[in-house]
Amino acid sequence: MSSTSHQHPASAPVYVVDLDAGHAQFLARQVRAAGIYSEILPRTRTGELADRAAAGVILAGDQSLASVEPLPGVPVLRAPRETWREEDLAAFLGGLDVPRTWTPEAIIDAQVAAIRERVGTDRVICGLSGGVDSSVAAALVQRAIGDQLHCVFVDHGLLREGEVEQVRRDFVAATGVNLTVVDATDQFLAALAGVSDPEAKRKAIGREFIRSFEAAARGLVAEAAGAPVRFLVQGTLYPDVIESGADGATNIKSHHNVGGLPDDLQFELIEPLRELFKDEVREVGEALGVPESIVWRQPFPGPGLGIRIVGEVTAERLAILRRADAIVREELSAAGLDRQIWQCPVVLLADVHSVGVLGEERTYGHPVVLRPVESEDAMSAQWSRLPHELLAQISQRITAEVREINRVVLDVTNKPPGTIEWE
Ligand code: XMP
């Protein structure tokens, strides 16, 4: 059971029975977009419906897999993936006797009340990554308990241009959170020296992250005389909860890298986004005044630019990649494509020396790869058909403004078979 359900802005949910993973999530989001709270129920657990109060039931996907006993008085909608219609869903929802109270404001109010009640006068810490989830989770907890929350931001030196400032300056200004910044760039670079295997990089980054976070957390615990630091905020989302298979299980996102804290430094988890889909997290973030640059940030991997340099990660290579990446982001934004594109990794092939020509001279530089993709959930992705004029502009700018790069190439591979990241 979720820690917050007793404060819920909705009485009884619409249950969406999952007969087809992607489709069930899609329908559950549609129901919520209509202001009605919905939950996904795996088809192996439909028996539980008999004991739960349900406003309605939607059987999402292959109907031959559905075996739901009719529940007295509970409307049921059959929605096979191929033949369901938006009008049918709207009519079904229109016929339900439920209040349409699932709004960002109501979610915030309910969470604020639940967090206050649970935390009391104790203290809470939160690791910020610069991403949407940890930022919105922190802003929500800050709204509830103010200065009892302390955030830690480990700057691993692998973020993109401007992102550290967005956290240090813009996020703090917008939300008023207490923030400790750990500048660990040198430590991460030292750990990455000589490492070019992608999984070894991830391990090194994960290990250093835990070390830095743990040191900062110990500092805060030691300082907090009188009011113990009892809780840790996690930006777990509803799809993580569904995918972990058990909605009671504690599910720590491995890429947040705080799952490995030592036994003497254990916290109870606060997961204020546990019931929310990503689009709801963004709406809640906007309602809380989290800066747009963070709320609308595209997915970015925890190990950051460290896994976008094919080869060893060095300060110099990071600086090169950062400049190229900034140009790409600027041009995609100027073209109005930010919300259409899922993400666009820019990858530096640091060990490849490509031949170029500048005036009369031959040059040796590196190629960068543009990897723009469109996706619903990152499980599969299509390469984006960016306009040729835009590609020309990006290529022209990168080769003119970043001396070390003399070749820009485009990745035209779908996922599968190619992953989104190169490493
Ligand atoms: P792939 O490359 O597997 O990526 O198609 C799917 C999504 O996951 C992100 N990604 C990561 N995120 N730590 C993260 O936090 C990682 O090690 C990692 N590797 C990939 C990737 O950016 C994409 O959104």
Image (tube, grey):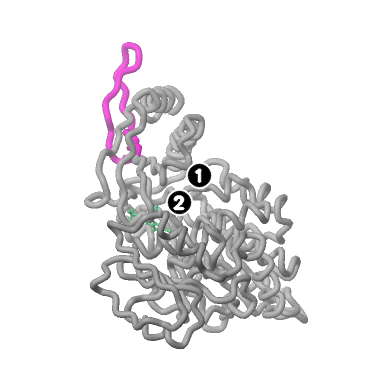
Please tell me which residue is depicted at 34% across the width and 61% down the height of the picture. 22
Secondary structure found at label 2: loop
Is the residue under label 1 in contact with that under label 2 (CB below 8 Å)? yes
Percent x, y of residue 341: 41, 42
- Specify whether residue 129 is in view: no
Secondary structure found at label 1: loop
Kindly report the distance in space between the C-alpha atoms of the residues bearing marks 2 and 1.
10 Å
Q: Nearer the viewer, residue 20 or 407?
A: 20
Q: Nearer the viewer, residue 84 or 288?
A: 84
Q: Nearer the viewer, residue 3 or 14?
A: 14
- The residue carrying mark 2 is 300
Percent x, y of residue 16: 41, 70
Q: Is residue 353 magenta?
A: yes
Percent x, y of residue 37: 53, 68
Q: Quadrant of residue 386?
A: top left
Please tell me which residue is depicted at 71% across the width and 68% down the height of the picture. 144
- What amino acid is at disc 1? Arg
- The residue carrying mark 1 is 160
Q: Main secondary structure of the magenta part?
A: strand
